[in-house]
Image (cartoon, rainbow, N blue to C red):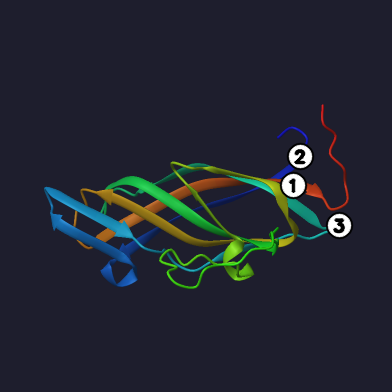
Amino acid sequence: MNCFESFSFYSSGNDGIGSFEGLESWGTLASNGWIVNSLGSSSQYNIQGFKNINVYGIDVIGFVGAKTGGNLGGIVTDWAFTLQVEGTVPQVSATITPSPNYFAISTSSANLDNVVLSKMNPSIRFSSPVQSVKSIIIDELYATGTHLETLGSLRLAWSVTFVVYYKYEGEEFALL
């Protein structure tokens, strides 16, 4: 990725979550599991300047874990952020068979600009970029885990940096 420009933005916080806010848990205290389906609201990073940018990749670096204390701890085993990269997504001419469409394949631009970065897959690269990107929105945070200290309660903490790789629209690659 050395032929690209890059910029970063940072997100951190901790949020007490109960069963009414999206935490689902099951089992006993000795052996339980939990999932946070979606955390909170969104945050938006707006691109500004005199040139449009084309995004070629995004990395997430950091952690999501449970904040200890107050009997709100637990073990986070996996996590994922859903980002919306608001720009023009490349497409090819295609059709989708309407039935069966069990996996709900879509060519809607409202769905194509979603990117999921996770603990297990912290990077995404695009050979054909998302063009004229105006903003990047952190839309959702999902997490799963085990061993809640208190069933139905968790304090989830995160500290992540998103690194975005881009070129200005109209600039050529300088391959080495």
Residue 145 falls left or right of residue 131 = left
Q: Determine the CA span between mark 3 and mark 2.
A: 15 Å
Of residues 8 and 176, the one drawn nearer to the viewer in this rendering: 176
Which of the 4 image quarters holds residue 136?
bottom right
Amino acid on which disc 2 is placed: Phe
Residue 162 visible in the displayed image: yes
Which of the 4 image quarters holds residue 175?
top right
CB atoms at circles 2 and 1 under 8 Å apart? yes
Q: Determine the CA span between mark 3 and mark 1.
A: 12 Å
Q: Is disc 3 surrounded by few (<14), some (14 to 19) or many (20+) residues within 10 Å? A: few
Residue 71 visible in the displayed image: no
Q: Could you tell me which residue is drawn at 33 percent across and 67 percent down?
A: 22
Q: Determine the CA span between mark 2 and mark 1.
A: 6 Å
Where does the N terminus fall, quadrant-wise?
top right
CB atoms at circles 3 and 2 under 8 Å apart? no
Q: Position of residue 149 (x, y in %)?
A: 19, 52
Q: Is residue 92 above or below residue 76?
A: below
Residue under label 1:
166
Q: Position of residue 85 (x, y in %)?
A: 64, 59
Residue 116 falls left or right of residue 130 = left
Residue under label 3:
51
Q: Could you tell me which residue is drawn at 52 percent across and 46 percent down?
A: 160
Residue under label 2:
4
Where does the C terminus fall, quadrant-wise?
top right
